[in-house]
Image: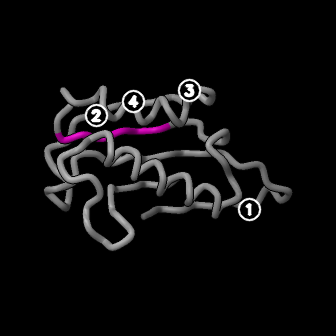
Amino acid sequence: MAGTAPIADDGATAGPGDVYAQSVRCLDIAEQALREAGATLADVIRTRVMLVDIARWREAARAHGERFSQVRPACTFVEVSRFINPEWLVEFEVDAVVATTDPGDSVTHEGP
């Protein structure tokens, strides 16, 4: 699992005020975490999208659809009251299953 917030490389909030831009950044972070774990977007089985304003779900869904239109993981959108940083409008959680050669191996990554 990778949980992501819209944090830019410099530590600032990516895309202030822009749910779509923040969603893209969250998905960039998640995709990088997947690569580091030996996975790809094709290994994703479930996503969760948390928004402080559920009325803006279409903006996050647009970014989600751009990445997952071919994968089609189970997806849930939920409204939350706030995040640690009040500039964050959205966070994503991404669950993936990665086949390993040793059934005892497991990889968990929580990001950013």
Magenta-span inclusion, residue 8: no
Residue segment shown in magenta = 47-52
Give the mark nearer the N terminus: 1 vs 3.
Answer: 3
Give the mark nearer the N terminus: 3 vs 2.
Answer: 3
Q: Amino acid at mark 1?
A: Asp
Chief secondary structure of the magenta span?
strand
Give residue 78's mark: 2
Residue at position x 31%, y 48% in the image: 22
User: Looking at the image, is 21 positioned above or below residue 84?
Assistant: above
Name the image quarter holding residue 59. Answer: top left
Give the mark nearer the N terminus: 4 vs 3.
Answer: 4
Residue that lies at the very extreme toward the right in this rendered image: 101
> In the rendering, at what x and y percent does residue 54 appear?
21, 30
Q: Amino acid at mark 3?
A: Ser
Q: Which residue is mark 1?
A: 105
Q: Amino acid at mark 2?
A: Val
Q: Which residue is mark 4?
A: 62
Mark in front: 2 vs 4: 4
Dot 4 lies on which element?
helix
Q: Amino acid at mark 4?
A: Arg
Dot 1 lies on which element?
loop
